[in-house]
Amino acid sequence: MTCPINGPRPVSEFFYHGELRPMPDPQAATDDAWADYVFNRNGAPGVKREWWYHLPSGVWFIAERDTATDQVLRTYLYSDAVAEAVQ
Amino acid sequence: MPWRLLRFALSKKHPEPRMFRAHAELKRSYDVVIIGAGGHGLAAAYYLARDHGITNVAVLEQGYIGGGNTGRNTTIIRSNYLTPEGAKFYDMSVKLWQDLSEDFDLNLFYSNRGHYTLAHTDSAMRTMRWRAEVNKHYGIDSEVVDAAAVHKACPMMDLSCNGHAPILGALFHAPGSIARHDAVAWGYGRGADQRGVEIHQQTKVTGIEIVAGKVKGVHTSRGHIATSKVLCAVAGSTPRITKMIGIDTPLFIHPLQAMVSEPLKPWLDPILVSGSLHVYVSQTARGELVMGASLDPYELHNTRSTFDFVEGLSSHMIDMFPFLADVKVVRQWAGMADMTPDFAPLMGKTEVEGFYLDAGWGTWGFKATPASGKTMSYTVANDRNHELIEGFTLDRFRKYAPTGEKGAASVGH
């Protein structure tokens, strides 16, 4: 796994935090929409944008990874542009 | 004891027939199509045919029988769960397991060992007491024992675990057992086959035909089948199937790895589990230690193995058993575990009429095989959820009513 700050490091140094998903507005969302956000996941294989964390240095970042082959395509820091892309 | 071997020796018919027939063609329609010829799918087919008289059934398998998680687990059977829903369900399963060799006339090498869940902390002791009380309430044989009792059952273990995690006591569950996992799939498969069920290996489901919210058929790599009922029992491949029909689920797939040591003289009778050290271990009749740990730390739809896993698990094994330091690991493997947020399964009817789920078996599916077959065959035959699986339906999440089984279903939390 390549940390955008520290470069390639052993994967045991990283913590996986799941797919990057847009959060619905908690005040405006219906109960069903909120339950869908809290519990349901896109469990099928594919290329996903995921949160990863480099434990020794405390860097949160995004990895684009193919969850069928475990191939990491790109890693980069989170930004407003990323947030807009997943909305 | 199965009498088949003796009957075979005295019989004049040799060689013995194959376990199940191969069918050249799929029929154009079936009453029920079961996706997945693992233990769960074949058990459902067996009980559909035996208990409900539904024999026009096809079991479709993209690989080979029992080649998924049925052949990739550590074969531990127990019912000492935390929730009433779990305890009752797995208790039914353990009772079915005890008669299964006779039922199939096939030796499952079912071996009753006793099962110790080790507690290394006060909070773990509290959970053990909780589980013991829930179990006793439902008539399940569980009790909390102290460290001396653990030492008596397993004198070879370092009770201090190398000083890292001294054992304070354990939850002892006398019915805890192991069985030969391939034979479970073969036994159910043969029993279903003898009653008219068709098992089609190397047959991949490519789509499910739904008209007006009802199942009408299944597209496969070998052609189309018309059916009104589909049971999906494909463990780690479940999200691929539910994606075909647009059902959202909380399932997420992480690999679960296990490994086996070289054969040793028998020294470990009980099954041992340590949540804190992320270890479960038993010794097979062949003398090998079968060892497992917690899930891999990230999503992956793949059965690759890692050296990290062997390294981590071996280090914890040596904390418990320092004399194993020179023993070699001979095999390792992985399965794709379909995990749920509450560590309870996903079973029963869904929003699509005629589509039934038997999934969410994560790291706890093997022991559930008979009960899952029983309850899912009832659910499919009657189009009504069996009472024992009402706590496991998919809509529990929409109702914010999970069945919290995490404290008893896995290690490493």
Image: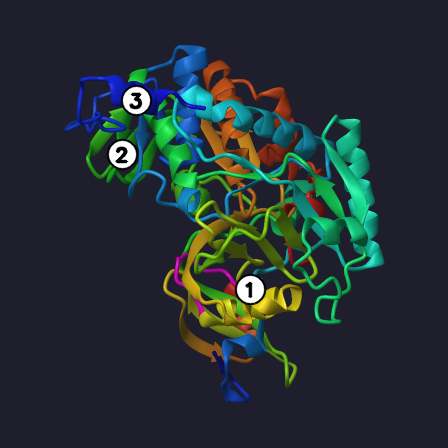
Q: Are marks 1 and 3 on the same chain?
A: yes
Is disc 3 placed on a helix, strand or loop?
helix
Which badge, 2 or 3, comes first in the chain's sequence?
3
Q: Residue A17 occupies which quadrant of the picture? A: bottom right
Which circle, 1 or 3, is nearer the viewer? 3
| Residue B333 within the magenta-colored segment of the rendering | no
Q: Are marks 1 and 3 in contact (CB under 8 Å)?
A: no
> Which stretch appears magenta?
B297-306
Which residue is drawn at the image coordinates 18% and 19% (left, top)?
B13
**Tag 2: residue type?**
His
**Which residue is the extreme one toward the bottom?**
A6
Which residue is label 2 attached to? B219
**Tag 3: residue type?**
Asp
Which circle, 2 or 3, is nearer the viewer? 3
Is disc 1 placed on a helix, strand or loop?
loop
For label 2, count other residues whose C-alpha is less than 10 Å away and answer few (under 14), some (14-19) or many (20+): some
Q: Residue A45 occupies which quadrant of the picture? A: bottom left
**Tag 1: residue type?**
Pro
For label 1, count other residues whose C-alpha is less than 10 Å away and answer few (under 14), some (14-19) or many (20+): some
Which residue is label 3 attached to? B193
Q: Identify the main secondary structure in magenta.
A: loop
Q: Is residue B213 visible?
A: no
Which badge, 1 or 3, comes first in the chain's sequence?
3
Which residue is label 1 attached to? B297
Relative height, residue B355 to residue B125 (above, below) = above
Which circle, 1 or 2, is nearer the viewer? 1
Task: Find residue B381 and report its horizontal and vertical position in percent.
Answer: 46, 16
Q: Are marks 1 and 2 in contact (CB under 8 Å)?
A: no
Subunit ID for the residue under disc 1: B
Is disc 2 placed on a helix, strand or loop?
strand
Q: Measure the C-alpha gap from mark 2 to mark 3.
A: 23 Å
